[in-house]
Image: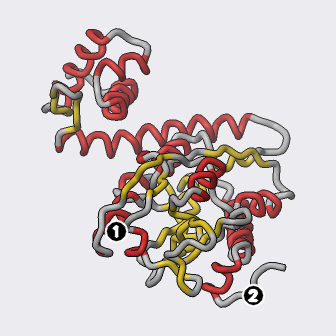
Amino acid sequence: MAELELRHLRAVRAVADGGSVSRAATVLGVSQPALTAQLKRIERILGGDLFVRGPSGVRPTELGRFVLARADALLSDMQNLVASARRHGESGPETLRIGYVPLLIIGRFIEELRELDVQTYAEPASLTLLKLLATGRVDVALLERFDGTEAHHFAGLTVRTLATEPIFVGIADGHPAIRDGVVDLADLAGCDWILPPPHENCVRVRFLQACAAAGFSPRVRHFTSEAGTAGTLIAQGAVCLAQAASAPPPGLVALPLRGDPLWTTLLFATREDDARTPTTDEVFRCAETAYTASRRRNPHFARWCGLAPAR
């Protein structure tokens, strides 16, 4: 009987990620007929179809999802083995590679890590960042819990909660929806919204649900994660979701939503097999220190937390 190999698992993962055999073939650097034939051999080995084919591409079957979940863990183990072996073979100070989604604590976090040799990698999508961590391309990840999170996304990882905080709204100072330093989500029903691109938006589903509960469907007109562009649009009357610690330029504010209908959880993740537990614990403490300091950046968040704003 033919044996299943790691290259087969990589091929299955590439097809799932690409959504089509042709895109996966391009990524893997093989021809589409060759990958199609290989996929058929893999399905024979595993005893069933891994994907449902359709005019718009492919999607995993139940068996496919089962295989993908375990394939990710196996591929991660292999990447970790290679990375660990390389580290054991290297001399000199070890570099700690930190991946992060755009969070306002990052500057203070790096300052707290001044005793370590650090490299940082910014990645706008939390799911992509988890894949970088699982495959050994970063050692620590700071991210937000995202809609659709499932157990297999964290397979082989140790995940700690850094903080859970409300999501504020970015809005022009003096906007009619502002009342006593708070904004009612329902009062934003007629506004144009700015959101991150869908694959970067961790709270897209929760946002739509919160708007529906407030009695409206949001009019999303702009997709950007670039702060300067968002600021220009906000100054013209649009609104956006904002990190609670945001300290916008003059004329703009980040304010709490009445009743705090939206929350986000900040996570600190490492690989389970990482042998540097003392170092990892110290890095987590640095992240906690950076987060605690960040709560004073926005006086509205500081007041929400019952703290004195930063001077």
Figure disc tally: 2
Tell me, yes or no, whether the two marked residues, 1 and 2, touch with CB atoms within 8 Å. Answer: no
**What crowding class fits label 1: few (fewer than 14 Cα within 10 Å), some (14-19), or many (20 or more)?**
some
Residue density around tag 2, few if under 14, some if 14–19, many if 20 or more, within 10 Å = some
Amino acid bearing label 2:
Ala
What residue appears at the point 44 percent right and 84 percent down from the top-left corner? 259
Residue furthest to the bottom in view is: 306
In the rendered image, the vertical position of residue 32 relative to residue 285, given as above or below: above
Name the amino acid type tagged 1. Answer: Cys
State the separation of the CA atoms marked 1 and 2.
31 Å
Query: Closest to the observer: 194 or 102?
Result: 194
Report the residue at 71% width, 40% height from top: 88
Q: Look at mark 1 in the image and give the residue it sits on.
A: 211
Q: Earlier in the sequence, mark 1 or mark 2?
A: 1
Q: Is residue 101 visible?
A: no
Which mark, residue 17? Answer: none
* Of the two numbered discs 1 and 2 in the rendering, the one whose residue sits closer to the viewer: 1
Checking the image for residue 308, the label placed there is 2
Q: Is residue 140 above or below residue 71?
A: below
Spot occupied by residue 78 in the image (x, y as percentages of width and height)? 49, 37
Which residue, as the protein is rendered here, is positioned at the far left? 48
Compared across the picture, whether 111 is left or right of 156 comes to: right
Question: Considering depth in this image, is 5 or 38 the residue closer to the camera?
Answer: 38
Which residue lies at the image location 36% right of the left edge and 17% below the top edge?
25
Rendering quarter of residue 253: bottom right
Q: Identify the image quadrant of the C terminus.
A: bottom right
| Percent position of residue 109, x then y | 75, 62
Residue 227: give x, y in percent of width and height. Answer: 63, 52
Towards the viewer: 1 or 118: 118
| Kind of element beneath mark 2 | loop
Quadrant of the frame with the N terminus: top left
Front in this rendered view, residue 269 or 203: 203
